[in-house]
Amino acid sequence: MDRDKIPLARLYRRLFSRFWPERLKAYDMIAEDLERRGCLLFKIRDIMPHEIDAKLLTGQIVSIYMKQRLPLKLSEFVAELERLYAFLLQPLSEETSRNHRAVQQLLAAIYDDDDEPARRQIATFFFEQSRPELSVLGNMFRCYGATMWEVRRRYKAAQALAENDLPLAQAGGGNGVA
């Protein structure tokens, strides 16, 4: 990591802050660092329509990952961040966990533990729709977009059900999960 371009102590402090505005500043710093490393994903609108969504998703992934490891020293934080960046920027074809389970778990960590439909959607995406030539992060963006589309579809189906007293299948909910 380029110590002159990113004040790592500030990033560390902001990422672990209890205050949302500080964490948002950390997310911006992370996106800027990834862009300096050649990551163009924050500007590609067909993968993630809004740059802020891409920054939030990436920031949440990094934040949750780091909180699971909770490095105590700045040097440990830097080493973990380097490993995570390398993982996120590598092509998915180089990620070796079975069915890309490591990627799935990293993405699923941003959802509530009881959000089974989102977890199933993530697993289905990486089994059927992932693109090995794209980076791990690029596939995460695509999966998140597909998952959010599905969440909106289920929400609209539940609204139609509530408004019209329709059976869920007629409202477009399909498998009965609203």
Image: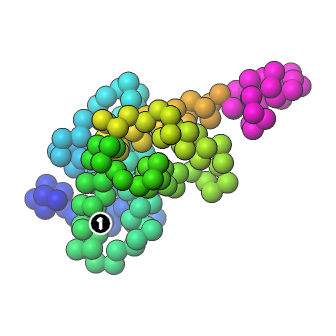
The magenta stretch is 154-178
Quadrant of the image for the N terminus? bottom left
Q: Compare residues 107 and 78 and report the one nearer the observer.
A: 107
Residue found 40% across the figure and 73% down from its top: 70
Quadrant of the image for the C terminus? top right
Q: Residues within 10 Å of mark 1 (few under 14, many from 20)?
A: some
Q: Quadrant of residue 66?
A: bottom left
The residue furthest bottom is: 72
Residue found 38% across the figure and 47% down from its top: 58
Magenta portion: prevailing SS class: helix
Q: How is the image coloured?
A: rainbow
Residue found 50% across the figure and 34% down from its top: 128
Q: Position of residue 95 (x, y in %)?
A: 34, 50
With 5 as the anchor, is 175 left or right in this view? right
Q: Compare residues 112 and 20 and report the one nearer the observer.
A: 112
Q: Is residue 160 magenta?
A: yes
User: SS class of the residue under badge 1?
Assistant: helix
Q: Position of residue 146 (x, y in %)?
A: 52, 32
Residue found 39% across the figure and 39% down from its top: 139
Q: Compare residues 81 and 10 and report the one nearer the observer.
A: 81
Q: Amino acid at mark 1?
A: Glu
Please indicate, yes or no, whether residue 144 appears anywhere in the rendered image: no
